[in-house]
Amino acid sequence: MELWVNRPHDGLVQSLTSMEQLRAGNLGRRIGQLLIGLFAFGWSMAMMVRADLGLNPWDVFHQGLTRFVPLSFGTVTIVVGALLLCLWIPLRQWPGLGTVLNVVLVGLSADLGLVVIDEYASLLPRVGLLLGGVVLNGLATAMYIGSHLGPGPRDGLTTGLVRASGRSLRLVRTVVEATVLAVGWLLGGTIGVGTVLYALAIGPLWQFFLPRVEAPLNLSVGSPPPPTHPGRP
């Protein structure tokens, strides 16, 4: 697996294999940041579920599946992530440390959040949970991306399809997320204002947070390949 990263000193990008990610220095901070980011990501998912005002496309799909299988929301998230890793094989993608931890920790955190966070009937606290969940999701995304330890299984699938198809990242991601959103809605997942808010806000949010939390790496200067960047767990 290769990961494209920004080099703060010159604004260029460099490809990192899974082993190079581990050898890029500052590992203590990067692993700690990864763990916090993944936990916060799962917690933000739980906040949006409890808000009941609409979920992001993949969580619409996860929630829809829970209506047909005897598994919790977080467990479904873990199972889907593990199955997506199997699709990486024909795409010649290899997981990094962050990828493996993403599969497990995000689902566990989401289930914990659903136990701790109350359900509300009135609109005001639900709006607060939605807004807080979207902002926390943006921060969490920036934290795990900024640790440079591998994309999540859903992002790796998207970037693998980009490489295999030769299509743009924007097009492939739109097709993938529109597909899982449609299937999730047909399965009974929640679509609403939160879905639209997430789609509009998540990109600007993680781009705002990323320069503020990105961990510095020890990279050798070389000729940069064309840039791309992951965007979700």
Image: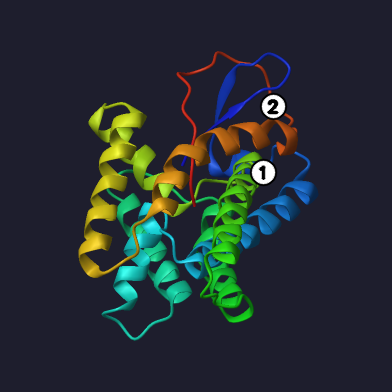
Q: Are marks 2 and 1 in contact (CB under 8 Å)?
A: no
Viewer-side label of 2, 1: 1
Residue 13 on image: x %, y %: 57, 21
Identify which residue is drawn at 44% across, 48% down. 94
Q: Amino acid at mark 1?
A: Ser
Identify which residue is drawn at 31% across, 26% down. 168
Identify which residue is drawn at 51% across, 70% down. 50
Q: Nearer the viewer, residue 193 or 47?
A: 193
Does any portion of residue 215 appear in the rendered image? no
Looking at the rendered structure, the secondary structure element under dot 1 is loop
Does any portion of residue 127 appear in the rendered image? yes
Residue 106 on image: x %, y %: 55, 64
Task: State the image quarter where residue 105 is shown.
Answer: bottom right
Residue 72 on image: x %, y %: 43, 80
The residue under label 1 is 147
The residue under label 2 is 219
Identify which residue is drawn at 51% across, 39% down. 201
